[in-house]
Amino acid sequence: MRVALPVPLPRLFDYAAPGGSTAGPGDVGRRVRVPFGPRELVGVVAEVGPADDATQALRTALEWLDDGPLLQGELAASLRWLARYTHAPLGEVLATALPAALRRGEPLPDTHAWAWQLTEAGRTALPGLKAGGRPHRLATLLAPQARDEDALDLALVGWRTPARTLATRGFAERFAVPASQLAPAPQAGPPLHAEQQRAVDAVAACSGFAALLLDGVTGSGKTEVYLQAIADCLARGRQALVLVPEIGLTPQTLARFRARLGVPVHALHSGLGDGERARVWTAAARGEARVIVGTRSSVFVPLPDAGLIVVDEEHDGSYKQQDGIRYHARDFALVRAKALDVPVLLGSATPSLESLQNAVSGRYAHLRLTRRAGAAKPPAVRVLDVRKRPLEAGLSPESLAAISAALAAGGQVLVFKNRRGYAPVLLCHDCGWSAHCPRCSTAEHPHPMTVHAGGRRLQCHHCGHRASAPPACPDCASLGLQPQGVGTERIEELLAARFADVPVLRIDRGSTRRRYALEGLFGTLGDAPGILIGTQMLAKGHDLPNLTLVCVVGIDEGLFSADFRAGEKLAQLLIQVAGRAGRADRPGTVLLQTHHPEHPLLLTLISGGYHAFAATELAQREAAGFPPFAPLALLRAESQQAQPPMAFLQAARRVLAPHAGRDAQGMPTLLLDGPVVAPMPRRAGVYRAQLLIACDQRPRLHAILDAALPDIYALPEARRARWSLDVDPVDLY
Ligand code: ADP
Ligand code: ZN
Ligand code: ZN
């Protein structure tokens, strides 16, 4: 039998079945433990039959890890497709698709749910616990009755830590309950408005595979459409998978799904332990999990009774896996929906240009929600020209006045700055020295350290390197070291001093490591006047009905980036951030500060909205031969030394170049750009370079890669650099 193993070699490995048995067709998809060199690996049987090379002595697999195939049917076929599409070894693709615990060879877990109850000791101790503390609050919740973990998610934010505290003291214990007992009675949603109803009907009318783009402005009620479509799917006895972006999976979202659907909703995200992830995966495989809501890797759950796949915020960058097997969860969701013959609903207020083009060309049904639901009005957007204006921590006098007025009117304010820390650069005003990361800089490309803690600490946002800020300039001993530019901490410092009577909360990766911490922060804000300062973590997620003003500070970096997707990303970010304002009955205002008020992107976006921007941008992409009109692939290489990545990519270029040809119009069918150093030429001590491969057609791109890759694997230079291929790269620069 041939086994797919998680090793970076483009082949399968021959083994004899364990224990003298003979592998049959029913063993394909079973996990097996095998010897591999001096190590043992967990693999998946990919093919059965006699060994390719009968002259070699066959090693024998050590043991079967499952009674039957773990990866089978549609999922197994789709994963083989993914391996071909990414040109990656099947064994690595299968390992990526399995939850970590199963990848390590652990047995399939029990799929019951868990509940918590107080012990006798806990009941006795309850009056003695510190009143108002989280252990006390949890114990009080559990005193009248045991509660399952889904219910605890709804009842007490961040309950897991106090639960562990109570358990170690013997005051509470966890016990298994059947998942089917957990279903709460479903709550009715608001009556759908006409556009929502049309969208729900369009999904219901699909008798098999169909791709539908739900293109609805922020707050138009897309989630209500998902909920109704999922309810219909459940009523037909089918499973639904909902993909959400990393920051979109808030306890608020989960609570909404759980309250409305009347079946247990299984969540899958990076905040769960390995055991829990394997449990959800297995529950899906057994058909017990009816609704799975999860982030990127949930696209790999087995769906034996699939009825619907939803991809919320389908444009979101977190759907693209940026290392290892570089899959795109939205794109793979489409492949799976097709193989499962079920509809896939892609939703966004700012659809990716790929999906919009598919909708425009008629490949996807285009469902529009053009108005906000309920009483909410679209926010008024104003561009603030800040040229020659005195700025304080990056804020113009007009912005500060608007913040003051919004707070006085009882509203909440969001100040958006896509740069965390105090300032992006520490500069010596006397000699021009600036602080650079020693692990991410080269002589030609110094990489600045971000200033934190009001100027006392330095941190590299790419490798995490930390240092304290020098008291004096290391080059000229001057004391004139100055933080240059503005980050969220600096804005927080100013606003906390200026508006001392309201809460000022900073939300970025520095202030909130955990999902639940974020929810706690929102809890402290409540509905009272206050200010939130944040990075793009705030562009999506928790709904703040009382938010009436959004100030966008410093978007100008994004206007002049070399990345061909920079305009798209900036337009999406601006629309999404602006969409946070005026979500309920109070009208919202958005102020966009810029030094480039005449920039075409801003003009188009303000006057015509996202769709006008998208039409212009798509025309430019088509003229330039960029995605979605022509496919790209990126060959990346890296090494501890500067030379090997370049040497490898030059050799790879020599392998690829002979595949170039001309089409009927005499235009080149293959363009090779590079090798060049990566946009960050060195990161965490590793030198990086890249070669861009552009092709006129997707089938041709894959044919060329199929033909060239065996030779690229065999290059002697390939052994001196770590390399990877990224088909449909998202970040080129
Ligand atoms: P989106 O997902 O498009 O941002 P949501 O589904 O979250 O929008 O809806 C935004 C707000 O409008 C929510 O508070 C939701 O409860 C409300 N809403 C949605 N649909 C309706 C409707 N048909 N009638 C009244 N309120 C609605
Ligand atoms: Zn100096
Ligand atoms: Zn660094």
Image (spheres, rainbow, N blue to C red):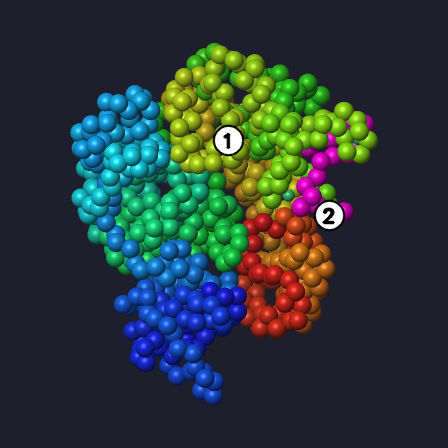
Foreground of the two, 156 or 342: 156
Rendered position, 16 above or below 76 = below
Q: Which residue in the structure is indicated by mark 1? A: 511
Residue for point 27% across, 39% down: 149
Q: Could you say which disc has been placed on residue 442 in the image? A: 2
Mark 2 vs mark 1, CA separation in Å: 30 Å
Rendered position, 499 above or below 366 = above
Residues in magenta, as a range: 425-444
Foreground of the two, 179 or 293: 179
Q: Amino acid at mark 1?
A: Ser
Are the two marked residues, 2 and 1, in contact with CB atoms closer than 8 angstroms?
A: no
> Is residue 155 inside the magenta stretch?
no
- Helix, strand or loop for the magenta stretch, by majority: loop
Q: Is residue 404 left or right of residue 219?
A: right
Q: At which x and y percent is residue 196? A: 33, 38
Q: Is residue 698 left or right of residue 672?
A: left
Q: Amino acid at mark 2?
A: Thr
Quarter in which the N terminus is drawn: bottom left
Q: Could you say which disc has been placed on residue 19 in the image? A: none
